[in-house]
C-alpha cells in the first residue's frame, strides 16, 4: 500500500523559510514523478512544483518560481520542498502526490496523480 507522509509545515513570518518533506513507502519511489500541490481556504487545490522520476527535470508554477525548490532523495524515498521568501498568500495546506504510472513525465494536472499525503499546514503571517 502506497503511503505519503508530509512534514515540516508550521507558522512563519513573511520573508521566512520552511522545508517540507514527503516520505514515501509502498512502491519503488524512484520510478515515479512526484509533485507538491497546495490548497488555501476556500480555493481549489493548485499545482506548485513537480520533479521527474529521474530527478533530472523540475517544473514550477509561476506563483512559486524563483522562491521554491523541489528535490528528491531516492535513497531515502523522500521528496522535499524548500520554500524561501514566503508570502502570506503562500498560506495553505501543502500536499505531496505521486503519479499514477511509473516512468511518466511531469504534469500539472491533479487527476494524473494517484496517491496523496494527508497534507501539512503552512501559515505565513504578515
Image (cartoon, rainbow, N blue to C red):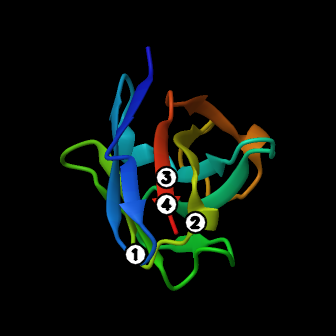
Q: Is 82 or 87 nearer to us in this picture? A: 87
Q: Nearer the viewer, mark 4 or mark 1?
A: 4
Q: Earlier in the sequence, mark 2 or mark 4?
A: 2
Q: Nearer the viewer, mark 1 or mark 2?
A: 2
Q: Relative to 67, is 86 above or below?
A: above
Q: Which mark is residue 123?
A: 3
| Residue 110 placement (x, y as % from top left) | 74, 44
Q: Given contact means CB atoms under 8 Å apart, are the residues at marks 4 and 1 in contact?
A: no
- Distance, label 1 to label 2, CA atoms, is 12 Å
Q: Relative to 14, is 51 above or below?
A: above
Q: Earlier in the sequence, mark 2 or mark 3?
A: 2
Q: Assign a secondary structure to mark 2.
A: helix
Residue bearing the label numbered 4: 124
Q: Nearer the viewer, mark 1 or mark 3?
A: 3
Identify the residue at horizontal 48%, vertical 41% (top origin): 121
Identify the residue at horizontal 19%, vertical 48% (top origin): 75
- Distance, label 2 to label 3, CA atoms, is 7 Å
Q: Given contact means CB atoms under 8 Å apart, are the residues at marks 1 and 3 in contact?
A: no
Amino acid at each position: 500500500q502506497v503511503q505519503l507522509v508530509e512534514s515540516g509545515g508550521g507558522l512563519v513570518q513573511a520573508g521566512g523559510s520552511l522545508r517540507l518533506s514527503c516520505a514515501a513507502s509502498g512502491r519503488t519511489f524512484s520510478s515515479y514523478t512526484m509533485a507538491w500541490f497546495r490548497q488555501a481556504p476556500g480555493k481549489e487545490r493548485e499545482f506548485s512544483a513537480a520533479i521527474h522520476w529521474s530527478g533530472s527535470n523540475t517544473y514550477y508554477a509561476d506563483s512559486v518560481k524563483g522562491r521554491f525548490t523541489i528535490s528528491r532523495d531516492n535513497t531515502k524515498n523522500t521528496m522535499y520542498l524548500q520554500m524561501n521568501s514566503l508570502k502570506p498568500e503562500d498560506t495553505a495546506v501543502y500536499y505531496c502526490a505521486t503519479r499514477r504510472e511509473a516512468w511518466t513525465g511531469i504534469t500539472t494536472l491533479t487527476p494524473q496523480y494517484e496517491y496523496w499525503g494527508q497534507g501539512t499546514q503552512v501559515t505565513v503571517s504578515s
